[in-house]
Amino acid sequence: MSQPSTLPTTLGGQAVIEGVMIRGPRGTAVCVRKPDGEIAVRTELNESGGRLSAVPVLRGIAALGETLTQGMRALVWSGQIAAGEEPEEPSRSQVLLTTAMSLGAMSALFILAPALAARRLERRPRFQRLSAAIEGGLRVGTLIGYLRTIGRLPQAKRLFGYHGAEHRAIQAYEAGEPLETASLHHFPNAHVRCGTSFLLTTTIMSSAVYAALGPQPLGRRILSRLILTPVIAGLSYEAIRLGAASSGRFWQLIFRPNLALQSLTTRDPDEGQMEVALAAVRAALDLHTPA
């Protein structure tokens, strides 16, 4: 596979309802299959990251924030298009509120719940030294259990098919293959820069950081997790960025669990899903090409 550094631009993305969002450095494109079979296209320019885009760790936090808000807008729009409705652009306040609520729910599930459980175990002398490891194990187990659970929902199977199509389309572009469905059959569903990889990397890295902090009172434990999570997310962004740019065996071994976990969040796409993903890649590349 060609290295991202040799390409005119590096692409990322996510699956949306009956479609795919592809994000490039200049702008983002969303393509969705309409009920009549046509493909609807929506594009927007990315907000400038300013000086933060050149600062390691901070650029990851900034990119994550913008990706979350863009992803939320894309999900709302794709849901309306897939249902055959006239799309209405959500207000900025609605997007921010929905994103904040989603982050709050995820924090409660993946940060607060394991921290509370580990704190309760610390009251037993035999578990005190192991509480950080137990908290980390609970966090990883919760993530895997969550992905397994949503993967059983009928709606998720379609979404995960588009997720696989997104990965294949990006890999075809990175390999310099023609952007057509026949090319996508040669590529796997997993991709090193996947959001699932980011989640697992953040989860494992946070477990190591929290273990170094040692036992803490409940209030300080929760506060430290909430404060450090954005920093750890930024570090995870840098780790994935570095690993994606390297073809060394060390990074292949490091990211093998990330690729394996994507078996829970991707499915083999059909021809129609691959067609939509390729349309999104082309639209995103058009935004990058100077007029």
Image: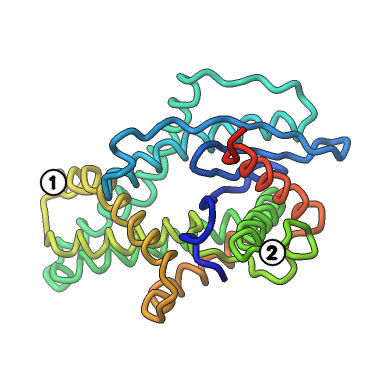
Please state which amino acid type lies under the numbered disc 1.
Arg
Instruction: Kindly identify the residue that appears in the image at 49 percent across and 42 percent down.
Output: 25
Identify the residue under disc 2: 177
Residue 98 position within the rendered picture, expressed as x and y whole percent measured from the top left: 48, 29
Q: Can you say which quadrant of the picture contains the C terminus?
A: top right
Instruction: Determine whether 67 is above or below 180 in the image.
Output: above
Residue 209 position by quadrant: bottom left
Q: Is residue 44 left or right of residue 181?
A: left
Crowding around mark 2 (Cα neighbors within 10 Å: few <14, some 14 to 19, many 20+) is few
Instruction: Determine whether 262 is above or below 272 in the image.
Output: below
**Disc marking residue 220:** 1
Please state which amino acid type lies under the numbered disc 2.
Glu
Residue 207 position within the rendered picture, expressed as x and y whole percent measured from the top left: 26, 62
Instruction: Kindly identify the residue that appears in the image at 32 percent across and 64 percent down.
Output: 204
Instruction: Determine whether 155 is above or below 211 in the image.
Output: above
Q: Secondary structure at mark 2?
A: loop
Residue 226 position within the rendered picture, expressed as x and y whole percent measured from the top left: 25, 43
Q: Can you say which quadrant of the picture contains the N terminus?
A: bottom right
